[in-house]
Image (cartoon, rainbow, N blue to C red):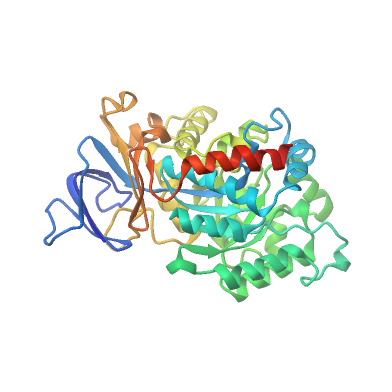
Amino acid sequence: MKTLFTNVTAVTMDPAGPVLKDAFVAVEGMKIASVGTRRPAGDFDRVVDCAGKVMMPGLINAHTHIPMVLMRGYGGGCDLHTWLNEYIFPAESRWDDQSIAAATQLGLAEMISSGVTCIADMYMRTDIIAREVVKAGISANLSCGAVYFGAPEDFSPEKCGDCQATEELRKSWHGAEDGQILIDASIHAEYTSCPPLWQWVADYGQRFDLGMHVHISETRSEHEKCLEKYGKTPIALFDQYGVWERGGQAAHCVWVSDEDMEIMARKRITAIHNPYSNLKLGSGVARVPVLSRAGVNIALGTDGVSSHNSTDLFADMKLAAILHNGVGCDPMAVTAPQALAMATVNGAKALRRDTGVIAPGKMADLILVDFTAPNLIPCHDPAENLVFSAYGSNVVMNMARGRIIYENGTFLTLDLEKIRAEVKDYALPKIFG
């Protein structure tokens, strides 16, 4: 399939040409073939006129738990650990494959319609999630966040369900569909596991060249209890066990220390900033400007809908900028281009994906935002409008891996009415009675 976009105003995230106007973007197969102000030669299967719209790279949600969309607004008003133990864990114990599939489809629909083309998802029954992601058309780094509550001396990977799940996922899905699905090694968190598990996950990830995805220092109590128990922060403790030997994605990082940041920069650990979730749960505010000055790559995630209430990454871009500008009393603490980078090119770097930039040879993950919408008029600076004015609902086209999967309110890979019925008639009664 060959597609040509004409009359393009593009926020490219490419330093060689940050904003292009009156441009042409050609896509052949899954890749961007050309970007420039001259129409490329040849015939195209489809020509898309982008007048009145702005093109940007598809958004990368670098930390999420898709099926938790069914828990939107459930257990609100609690701190993280009360919320997990009294609401989330009991609900999760009632999942089955059919309800996970329905919830995943619903979550994917919300993400796709708001411009997401790639995700990093950590959850259970991950093979079901992988199947639904493939059908939906976006790319995904998937992981089963390993948990082990038994005595450390009794641990063995053969008896740990999450270790076995990780191995099965890798064998079945890693690199599937020309790399659409990648499997990451994953530890849920320090407080839900123990050293033998950390060592196994670290070794497994290194042996098979997998990414690493971990919850890190989300709350003050988590961070301080780890220090009390082990004499080290979660970042430093996992470094001792080799978890970060190939870099990794550290979700939250609200309470990481200056010393942690030095390790993160040196070991190529990306901090996945989840501002909405952290604020809603009262976990605190990650020191994003300090992390940035320390040389740490920073990406964006929504976390689960259960603690965010949506998957609109435009909302997180806006919050990531205004929050730190306000906290630091500095209007340049996080600029619009920096917030856009967190949601695109920085996320691609974290997930080891060749995307996040509109440039020849990159994966054709592209979205169009309707700049004729009242909230985007006038436009003095496209980047400023995208970060501070746009909503996910302003997205009118989503092209993932060279294939248009959503356009003008219509899903081309998902049956929204069927999803709604499955959620209403089966998944919600199954989980909540």
| Closest to the observer, 234 or 158 | 158
Q: Is residue 107 left or right of residue 317?
A: right
Q: Is residue 226 left or right of residue 116?
A: right
Q: Is residue 259 above or below residue 79?
A: below
Q: Residue furthest bottom?
A: 207
Residue that appears at 60% across and 41% down: 423
- Choose top left, top right, bottom left or bottom right for residue 200: bottom right
| Closest to the observer, 78 or 238 | 78
Q: Is residue 167 above or below residue 227?
A: below
Residue that appears at 48% across and 37% down: 312
Q: Is residue 389 above or below residue 30?
A: above
Judge whether residue 5 can be spotted in this image: yes
Residue that appears at 65% across and 60% down: 186
Judge whether residue 285 can be spotted in this image: no
Q: Residue furthest top?
A: 374
| Closest to the observer, 238 or 421 | 421
Q: Position of residue 255 (x, y in %)?
A: 66, 43
Q: Position of residue 260 (x, y in %)?
A: 64, 52
- Choose top left, top right, bottom left or bottom right for residue 230: bottom right
Q: Position of residue 68 (x, y in %)?
A: 63, 43
Q: Position of residue 404 (x, y in %)?
A: 33, 51
Q: Is residue 398 left or right of residue 6?
A: right
Residue that appears at 40% across and 30% down: 388
If the image is split into quadrants, where does the N terminus sit? bottom left
If the image is split into quadrants, where does the C terminus sit? top right
